[in-house]
Amino acid sequence: MATVAPNDHRMDILELLTRASIWFSVGCWAWVIAALLRQGAGLTERWLWTVGAGFYVIHSVAAFARFYQWSHAVAMGETARQTLAATGFESGAGLWLNYAFGIIWLLDAAYWWTRGEARYLGRSRLIQGVVHGFMAFMILNGTVFFGHGAVVYFGALVFLGLAASIVRRLRK
């Protein structure tokens, strides 16, 4: 068994799982939002919405295992440090927003399955706007503003694509 030097930057399985799961999660989210902007959504999108929420749970669990030693306090401190570095304002509130994000996505997926497509797609625009607006805000922050490396470009491409979908929809 080979030993890894402390300064070796190879990714371990939990780090890979943390990173890969959020890419899949954001990809599922973007697919469904694009479908909703185009014409609506069907069974494929309902499954992708659910799978995306599942990948987000995997991302969160893997991150807590790999980066935060299963500690809310450690996660809160790291969130505050990252927020300070990115904004000049030290706050761990983003961690609570991440908890809310996961709960909202899971509840939204459960609502879609239990109430059906017609009821899910027919709910009030206010509720749709709040749910999807909050999720978009969190994903934009997580990828573009707080992300590092390739995920920043991935997030930017996702949001540029969604912006183009919105423009197309508004033109119709």
Image: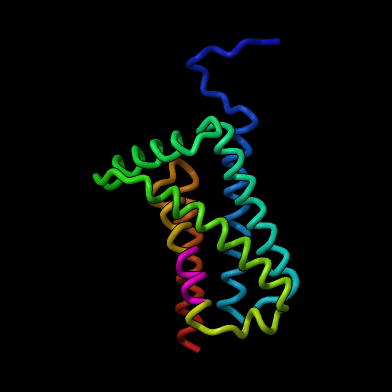
- The N terminus appears in which quarter of the rendering? top right
On the image, which quarter does residue 13 sit in?
top right
On the image, which quarter does residue 19 sit in?
top right
Range drawn in magenta:
128-135
Point 63% across, 38% down: residue: 17
The foreground one among 172 and 61 is 61
Q: Taking 111 as reference, is 92 above or below it?
A: above
Report the colour scheme: rainbow
Point 37% across, 45% down: residue: 92
On the image, which quarter does residue 60 sit in?
top right
* Residue 3 placement (x, y as % from top left): 62, 10
Is residue 89 shown in magenta?
no
Overall secondary structure of the magenta section: helix
Point 45% across, 41% down: residue: 149
The foreground one among 107 and 159 is 107
* Residue 2 placement (x, y as % from top left): 66, 10
